[in-house]
Image: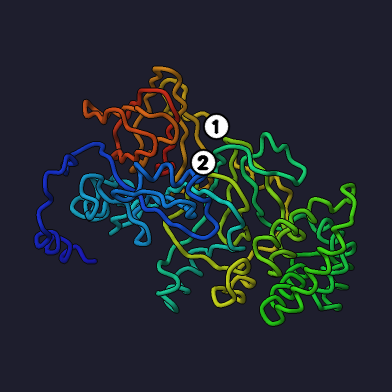
Amino acid sequence: MSDVVKPIIAALAPPIPDLGEPESGKLFRIRGQVHDYGWGKPSSSSLVAALAIEGGEENFKPKPQHPYAELWMGTHACGPLTLYSAPSRKLSDVFAADPEYWLGHVLVEKWPGTCDIPFIFKILSIAKALPLQAHPDKQLGTQLHKTDPYEFVDENHKPEIAVALGTPVSDAFGGDPNMTTFTGFVGFAPLNAISGALSAVPELAQAVGDERALNEFFSSPSKVTLKRIFSALLVRGKDFPDDIKRSVDQLLARISASSNDDPLAMQFALAKRINEQYAGDVGVLAAPFFMNLIRLKKGEAIYIGADEAHAYLEGDIVECMAISDNVLNAAFVPHEQRHLRTFLDTVTYTSREQSHWILPVAPLERSVRGKTTKFSPPLEEFEVLHTVLDQSGTETIRAARGPTVAIVVEGCGITFEVEGERLETIPRGGVVFVVPGKEVTVEGEGEVWWATTHDLA
């Protein structure tokens, strides 16, 4: 939009009513958007459902046993934030009147013409495996949007982080069931582990169905030969789903009598679990035997860059990503929803140890009282902060250069203050916006998670 057109549109726009969030305000409550995908947790156990009562749409009431998967907190068109006291008014519309005030001059200079927060902040509640997927980089995102703007709604990349929350999950795969709060498949396992699985599991090699590609991989494991066999497996899942289902059924029948001491016992247990969710799907073979299983304890995090295969499995997480909703699905969705060829051409076939994906936690330099830590991926768009307040606790966080979104995940009466403006006793699930360049103080007992722009130097 040109600089000439912008003031004309602003002049024609209806005046902003006095809703308790004045145009010069420094902080105010906002509302996120709930998404109820089938892989979400039922309302009785969904953290998303619990938080959305205060942080979601107006008059949100969870339906009994309905799956609630995601609470979005961003300005992306697929799930935009709105004003708390005027739920029909999108936050991005407020920003349009004065982007530099609401987003910060550094952000506006870096991304000219934007009226968006450069990230999407989310809470996820996961009961079963998400689609096996990857997110395109910026170049591919632009191409996909140009070719199919209905399916790929923006041009951006979508690197993301996930931080584990919640209570322990049913980790029966060799982890500590009293400590693991998140499990998920991320990236390709080391080549020797994949080779060992292919050698030991005849049903897996049968499902790949390309003897020449298998022999080349065994004799020379590499990204190139891994791509050939992984592509062969997923393509057969699309073209010959009955054959893949037969291989899955044969595997499960055989491993039902196998010993827990089998070196592949974890992969067998994972295949059995996933088959209960997506019977006969090619992902039942692809994820457990080709990918890393990542386990996180509460407060641990992973970073997933563009073009990396992943499929979260179970748990509650804080998630944050660059502002995009582009996704390439390859399994655990109906065949018509798979972008298989693009996925296979896009994915990075680099095998890595599990430790590669871990994003360390560090003290936040802007924390005045040392009660806030940060998760900082190698990106400009965002970092995630975590504040823990003990009884009658207080924390002050010095100013960020960009906009900040906060959600109260634990606690029932957190107070936010910026330069004399106060929001009193924000309940669990309450979502708050803080303008750039302002120091913010929080008081109370509980936990606050924040997303803000990274170092916009």
Image coords of residue 357 (percent x, y): 64, 47
Secondary structure beneath disc 1? strand
Vertical arrangement, residue 417 with respect to residue 312, above or below: above
Q: Nearer the viewer, residue 94 or 105?
A: 94
- Amino acid at pointer 1: Ala
- Image side of residue 436 versus residue 94, left or right: right
In contact (CB < 8 Å): disc 1 and disc 2 = yes
Q: Which residue is mark 1?
A: 362
Residue 227's x, y, as percent? 73, 70
Q: Residue furthest bottom?
A: 239
Nearest to the observer: residue 345 or residue 274: 274
Look at mark 2 in the image and give the residue it sits on.
376
Task: Residue 457: tell me if it is visible.
Answer: no
Q: Quadrant of residue 200?
A: bottom right
Q: Sequence order check: which comes first, mark 1 or mark 2?
A: 1
> What percent of the width, then of the height, locates residue 426?
32, 32
Residue drawn at point x = 61 percent, y = 69 percent? 330
Q: Which mark is residue 4?
A: none
Q: How is the image coloured?
A: rainbow
Amino acid residing under circle 2 = Ser
- Relative side of 409 to 1, left or right: right
Alpha carbon separation for disc pair 1 and 2: 8 Å
Q: How far from the left and from the top, in percent, is residue 331?
A: 63, 68
Q: Is residue 158 visible?
A: yes
Q: Is residue 152 left or right of residue 96?
A: right
Residue at the location (35% across, 28% down)?
414
What residue is drawn where x is 52% and y is 65%? 327
Which quadrant is the N terminus positioned in? bottom left
